[in-house]
Amino acid sequence: MQRSLLVGIAGLFALAFLASCSHSPSGPDAATPRATGPVTIYTVNYPLQYFAQRLGGQHVKVVFPAPADTDPALWTPSPAIIAGYQSADLILLNGASYAQWTRTVSLPPSKLVDTSASFHDQIIQVEQGVTHSHGPGGEHAHAGVAFTTWLDPRLAILQAAAIHAELISLRPQYADDFNRGFDSLKEDLEEIDARIAGVVGQKNELPLIFSHPVYQYFTRRYDLYAEAVPWEPNEMPLEAMWQEFASLRERHPAAWMIWEDEPDKAIVSKLREMGMESIVFAPCGNAPSEGDYLARMHANIENLAKVFQ
């Protein structure tokens, strides 16, 4: 009887030991399995979507939900779209005050990536701004902080590097793929930078007027002699705006106007009467109607060549 009792107790201890081993693994095989499957990424503008997709390839699912007819910098998403951001693995912010709505809603801090944080000391402060309106974003002014950071390709590379680091942190098993994606993207952005510098050449003192005050990083990078006005390509400026424009040209005799998008033919015609021609250099905050970011930037450069040829 006593021997049977001892055997029973020993059996219970053995079962308990086996159970503990099955729930508390140890050794190299005991680590938490790495996450698999695509990383879901939400972005606040198209350049970040493009960079993330180039870097992540098949390992990411990148969502940029802003409608095609809006300026993402001024757009405010619906509660349903905000819920999508909240459920993402990563939320890519442009930083530099871009997409102010992100400051007024609850987004998981652990998922937020400020892609311009590494060059905070290079952010451009805008001292003055003219209040105006365009599209469904309503009235706004460009005072405060310049936000189109990616128009300096060197800063765009730093933004891509921030995304690259986050992807490796989340899916280290795909680091080789992410490294190849980053190297390829970096090479393309460096080519854009070199092409623009080559087009501008030694003619950077040529007077230019930009149709919107969003080219600050672009003009700084290539040391351009430029002024900007708050015009919209599809809205004929008021007579008072034309008078101000004429005064501007008296001290800044530009022969070229550079637009965000194709300007209305009536505007182009009136500018031509004043001795000015027009080209488009699209900032690409939103997705282009044709092609992708890289194709659009190369098209921009072809247009820019007309100015400096």
Image: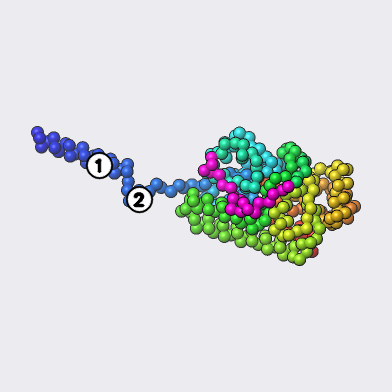
Percent of width and height locating residue 167: 52, 51
**Residue placed farthest to the front in the image?**
127
Residue 26 within the magenta-colored segment of the rendering = no
Q: Is residue 25 left or right of residue 119?
A: left
Q: Which residues are magenta?
A: 108-127
The crowding category of the residue bearing disc 1, from other C-alpha atoms within 10 Å (few below 14, some 14 to 19, many at least 20), is few
Inspect this view and state whether residue 197 appears.
Answer: yes
Front position in the image: 208 or 89: 208
Q: Quadrant of the N terminus?
A: top left
Q: Quadrant of the C terminus?
A: bottom right
Q: Which residue is mark 1?
A: 17
Q: Is residue 175 left or right of residue 287?
A: left
On the image, which quarter does residue 71 sit in?
Answer: top right
Percent of width and height locating residue 22: 30, 43
Q: Which residue is mark 2?
A: 29
Look at 65% across and 41% down and name the residue there.
100
Percent of width and height locating residue 51: 60, 52
Q: Is residue 263 left or right of residue 123?
A: right
Q: Is residue 225 left or right of residue 55?
A: right
Percent of width and height locating residue 268: 84, 50
Residue 116 within the magenta-colored segment of the rendering = yes
160 up-or-down from 130: above or below: below
Q: Label 1 sits on what residue type?
A: Phe
Look at 21% across and 39% down and name the residue there.
13
Which secondary structure lies at badge 2?
Answer: helix
